[in-house]
């Protein structure tokens, strides 16, 4: 029986001699605990030991178990913590970060060995020195900065939490990376990646994704309709070839930082205002001419829209005319209002494209063909603490494109043309 955990050894004699009981007091070290008999011992009568192996001591330290256990402290075993107190030597083995089920099994076997009771083969093994993989902590961070260092013949460690692969001229995302279930940070900047696989959304823990300085031309909508909606907090897509962003991006409601600099974007997603937790937004050096109406709903710490060809913003103007909405529009509004789920298997591509171009009225309702459009001037200081000028003249205003979905909203606008509502 083997248990992988963190162990801290406290010598109870040390305090009486004014010595520290452990060199790693309060920290502990990665170790493997094995329950077994010495090689060559009788399989039934041989003495049972608890052997502790670490990276510095792979041969292990052995503790006799029969009649040698003073007490077992297992109050917090459900949290993977326990302490085994030995009579000789006077050591306390403090266990933490262990699998609760395996820890319970080990403690039960230790009690049997202490009382000299018969044990099964599954509980007792032959004690042998530990291998490097058994005593070294699992690798959680990995950086590959050269093509020759990229792992081609071996897999990525499944325990990785942070993975950085830069300057390796990769043209796609390795499918082996998509299987890293614990990955929280993925940095694949400075490569030649052209597309992102839709299955990248299956990485349930991914919170920080950096794909800057690649050759991305589009993002799949399903990419943002996955579990990333609840995990993604930082997204860097700067220095790519993106011409548009899918409106599904706005489903990532936990997004805090969004970098879109140096692309070919002609606009921002209409529903960007749904990103209520967004605090840092940079979209410098794109082709954005107008901001969407929902931009008003953002509450940012920093916004940078420098070097975009914004239209000359003047006084608010109304364009268009409201008519009775078509059956297609009414149906589309119902689908969006009730958030009905649909896929390409349910609807023709033309209808999906129609649903994707929904415009949001300042009242919060969606409209498609039947709306009144108006342009207004937005002071960026209104929604951000730190504002970078949008041009070399130092302007901090940008034109806002908004839509009115009904006669009621239109009448409200005509009554107070300078008053925006959220």
Image (cartoon, rainbow, N blue to C red):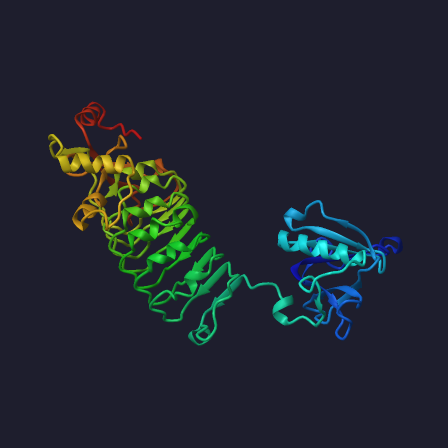
Image point (27%, 60%), residue name:
217
Foreground pick, 38 / 19: 38
Q: Position of residue 330 (x, y in %)?
A: 18, 34
Q: Position of residue 279 (x, y in %)?
A: 41, 43
Q: Quadrant of the N terminus?
A: bottom right
> From the viewer's perspective, is residue 148 above or below residue 322?
below
> From the viewer's perspective, is residue 283 above or below residue 193?
above
4 vs 60, left or right, is: left
Foreground pick, 78 / 158: 78
Q: Is residue 309 visible?
A: yes
359 vs 177, left or right, is: left
Foreground pick, 244 / 253: 253
Q: Position of residue 137 (x, y in %)?
A: 61, 63
Residue 90 falls in image quadrant: bottom right
Foreground pick, 207 / 86: 86
Residue 199 falls in image quadrant: bottom left
Image point (72%, 48%), residue name:
74
56 vs 13, left or right, is: left
Question: Which residue is most to the right?
Answer: 17
């Amino acid at each position: 029986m083997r248990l992988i955990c963190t162990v801290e050894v406290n010598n109870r004699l040390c305090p009486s001699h004014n010595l520290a009981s452990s060199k790693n007091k309060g920290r502990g070290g990665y170790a493997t605990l094995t329950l077994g008999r010495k090689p060559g011992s009788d399989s039934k009568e041989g003495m049972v030991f608890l052997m502790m192996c670490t990276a510095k001591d792979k041969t292990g330290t052995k503790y006799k178990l029969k009649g040698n256990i003073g007490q077992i402290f297992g109050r917090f075993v459900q949290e993977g913590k326990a302490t085994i107190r030995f009579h000789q030597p006077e050591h306390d083995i403090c266990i933490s970060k262990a699998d609760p089920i395996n820890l319970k099994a080990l403690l039960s076997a230790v009690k049997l060995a202490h009382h000299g009771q018969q044990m099964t083969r599954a509980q007792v093994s032959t004690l042998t020195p530990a291998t490097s993989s058994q005593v070294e902590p699992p690798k959680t961070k990995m950086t590959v900065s050269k093509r020759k260092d990229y792992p081609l013949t071996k897999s990525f460690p499944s325990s990785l939490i942070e993975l950085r692969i830069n300057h390796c001229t990769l043209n796609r995302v390795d499918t082996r990376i998509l299987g890293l279930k614990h990955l929280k940070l993925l940095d694949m900047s400075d490569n030649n990646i052209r597309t992102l696989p839709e299955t990248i959304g299956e990485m349930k823990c991914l919170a920080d994704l950096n794909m800057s300085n690649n050759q991305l031309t589009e993002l799949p909508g399903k990419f943002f309709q996955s579990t990333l909606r609840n995990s993604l907090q930082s997204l860097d897509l700067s220095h790519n070839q993106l011409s548009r962003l899918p409106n599904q991006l706005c489903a990532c409601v936990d997004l805090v930082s969004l970098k879109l600099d140096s692309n070919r974007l002609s606009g921002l997603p209409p529903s960007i205002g749904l990103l209520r937790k967004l605090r840092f937004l940079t979209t410098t050096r794109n082709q954005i001419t107008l901001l969407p109406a929902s931009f008003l709903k953002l509450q940012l710490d920093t916004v940078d829209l420098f070097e975009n060809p914004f239209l000359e913003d003047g006084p608010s103007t109304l364009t268009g005319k409201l008519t009775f909405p078509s059956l297609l529009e009414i149906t589309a509004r119902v689908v969006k209002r009730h958030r009905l789920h649909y896929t390409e298997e349910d609807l023709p591509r033309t209808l999906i494209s129609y649903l994707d171009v929904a415009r949001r009225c300042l009242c919060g309702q969606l409209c498609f063909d039947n709306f009144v459009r108006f342009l207004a001037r937005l002071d960026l200081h209104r929604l951000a603490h730190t504002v970078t000028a949008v041009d070399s003249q130092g302007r901090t205003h940008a034109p806002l494109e908004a839509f009115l979905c009904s006669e009621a909203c239109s009448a409200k606008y005509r009554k107070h043309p300078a008053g925006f509502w959220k």
